[in-house]
Image: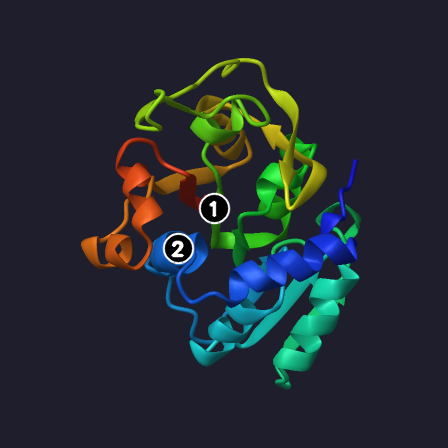
């Protein structure tokens, strides 16, 4: 199933408001660690999957990429991206990765920030990415950490009567598959997979794992957003960099 929650206007408006805040989890935790893993993009051909409002795709252009294509299933996202970022070597397309037909072996760098956990068929996703990457091409993606997605929609942090956090509940970890939650709206869908499934799927499709990051915040980031202190007790995100061999 291809979920397109970002074209729910109620959801999208609230999502825009979150991303507009200077101090949020993306800006203070996920993106700083993600950007550190980007290869040299000079004269490279880039595909950004789930490009959202196009900020990262535009960043790649500023890093010297030859051409960047951003794809997203959401009309709201693509419309916003086209308004925000205009460059002759930057294009945005409203399409799901599952429906995209890209020539094999022509992409130098595939990126995706916090999207893969929304895609039902992870095996097909990685197989297609491997096929479109050139030899030596790189995949860099971030997802919600499997520790978090395992019990998604059920109890997460457990607190005592004084609301002091005791621990984070991890349950149903080996039970892979669909999870639903209330995030801005009801019944937002995502898919839980174990770390071993994620990494082995890459390996089985000819992608050599180069780096794995479970981001922790800087002290400065915690000062800006105190809730980030919980990241020292359990990670929200998993970032993986892999190369096609």
Residue 169 picture quarter = top left
Element at label 2: helix
The dot on residue 34 is: 2
Q: Where residue 45 appears, x then y in whole percent?
A: 55, 68
Upstream in the sequence, badge 1 or badge 2?
2
If the image is split into quadrants, where does the C terminus sit?
A: top left
If the image is split into quadrants, where does the N terminus sit?
A: top right
Height in image: 59 above or below 159?
below
Residue 225 seen from this side: yes
Height in image: 38 above or below 201?
below
What residue sits 54% from the left and 70% below the top? 55
Name the residue tied to disc 1. Answer: 142
Residue 73 seen from this side: no
Q: Residues within 10 Å of mark 2 (few under 14, many from 20)?
A: many
Q: Nearer the viewer, residue 61 or 192?
A: 192
Q: Nearer the viewer, residue 160 or 17?
A: 160
Total count of labels: 2
What residue sits 36% from the left and 58% below the top? 28
Height in image: 215 above or below 234?
below
Q: Where residue 4 appears, x then y in whole percent?
A: 76, 48
Q: Which of 65 and 235 is in front in this view?
A: 235
What residue sits 33% from the left and 42% below the top? 213
The dot on residue 152 is: none
Residue 71 picture quarter = bottom right
Do labels 1 and 2 touch, CB within 8 Å?
yes
Element at label 1: strand
């Amino acid at each position: 199933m291809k979920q397109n929650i970002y074209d729910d206007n109620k959801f999208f408006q609230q999502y825009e408001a979150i991303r507009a805040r200077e101090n949020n989890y993306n800006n203070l935790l996920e993106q700083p660690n993600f950007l550190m893993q980007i290869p040299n993009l000079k004269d490279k051909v880039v595909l950004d999957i789930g490009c959202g409002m196009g900020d990262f795709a535009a960043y790649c252009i500023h890093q010297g990429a030859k051409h960047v294509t951003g794809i997203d299933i959401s009309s709201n996202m693509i419309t916003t991206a086209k308004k925000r970022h205009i460059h002759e070597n930057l294009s945005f397309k409203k399409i799901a990765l599952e429906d995209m037909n890209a020539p094999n072996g022509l992409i130098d760098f595939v990126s995706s920030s916090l999207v893969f956990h929304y895609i039902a068929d992870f095996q097909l996703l990685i197989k297609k990415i491997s096929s479109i990457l050139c030899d030596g091409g790189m995949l860099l993606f971030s997802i919600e950490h499997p520790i978090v997605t395992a019990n998604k929609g059920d109890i997460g942090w457990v607190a005592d009567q004084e609301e002091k956090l005791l621990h984070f509940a991890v349950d149903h970890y080996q039970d892979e598959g669909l999870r639903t939650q209330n995030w801005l709206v009801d019944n937002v869908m995502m898919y839980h997979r174990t770390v071993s499934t994620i990494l082995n799927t890459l390996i089985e499709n000819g992608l050599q794992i180069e780096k794995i990051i479970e981001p922790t915040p800087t002290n400065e980031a915690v000062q800006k957003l105190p809730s980030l202190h919980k990241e020292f007790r359990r990670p929200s995100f998993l970032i993986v960099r892999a190369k096609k061999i």
